[in-house]
Amino acid sequence: MKARTIMEISMLTTVPTALFLCAYFEVQAAALLTALVAVASFIPFFANFERSRPAPSEIMPIVVLSAAAVVGRVMLAPIPNFQPVSALVIFTGLYFGRGSGYLMGAFSALVSNIILGQGMWTPWQMYAWGVMGFVCGLLTEKGVLQSGKKRGIYAYGIIASFLYGLLLDTWFIVAFVYDVNAGSALAAYGAGLVMNISHVSSTVIFLALTLGPLGRKIERVKMKYGLGS
């Protein structure tokens, strides 16, 4: 495994590790501390992107897909947690690689929250969506996911969307639930279940809408302009 991949994975795993340690030691400032760790995990990805000096043709897919995700999330905001962001993040990782997938997920959360509202949840949404795109790109590079095999992509979308909700719910419990026990944790997870089901459903629906026609167009664009992963 290349040193860059090891560094990226190490940075990503520090965030759930910090969350676990804050829960285990019952750290009072868990909300702030874990948010700072999440922000720190962004550094190698943005640094690598800047160091690579990407051409405009490499930046444009991230910009366009992020814009589509932001517009879709804002327009569908009246429907609780029903949005196209996860599907487009997965789409980006699938067709443009793990780095683009991570950046697109992080940017989509940051920009859409400028409209919908920023808060302590923003770094966690940036991290969760970024990881979703990164892992999708990594699995594609390893041949586990393939653009022509939709069932595997749908399965990844379901699992990744569920884990996104689980991570955000866990962060809420650790950071803001005063007396954490089995009862309070189950209550918090139960309260978020409907939201998570809505998220999973929207991911599958939007993947079904994008993988076919849009995927074929992206493949042609990549071939025409020599865009790699």
Image (tube, rainbow, N blue to C red):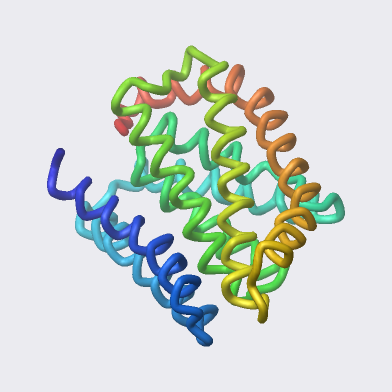
Q: Is residue 103 above or below residue 123?
A: above
Q: In the picture, residue 145 is in which quadrant? A: top left
Between 189 and 162, the one lying in front of the other is 189
Q: Is residue 205 above or below residue 30?
A: above
Residue lying at the far right in this picture: please name it.
78
Q: Is residue 186 left or right of residue 32?
A: right
Q: From the image, which quarter does the N terminus lie in?
A: top left
Q: Is residue 62 above or below residue 205?
A: below
Between 188 and 203, the one lying in front of the other is 188
Q: In the picture, residue 14 is in which quadrant? A: bottom left
Residue lying at the far front in this picture: please name it.
182
Rendering coords of residue 152 (x, y %):
51, 20
Residue drawn at x 50%, y 79% as measured from the top left: 26
Residue lying at the far bottom in this picture: please name it.
28
Residue drawn at x 36%, y 41% as measured from the top left: 98
Q: Is residue 177 above or below residue 76?
A: below
Q: From the image, which quarter does the C terminus lie in?
A: top left
Between 186 and 97, the one lying in front of the other is 186
Rendering coords of residue 211 (x, y %):
58, 22
Residue drawn at x 36%, y 30% as measured from the top left: 139
Residue drawn at x 38%, y 63% as measured from the top left: 17
Tag count: 0
Q: Is residue 59 left or right of residue 122?
A: left
Rendering coords of residue 45 (x, y %):
31, 57
Rendering coords of residue 150 (x, y %):
55, 17
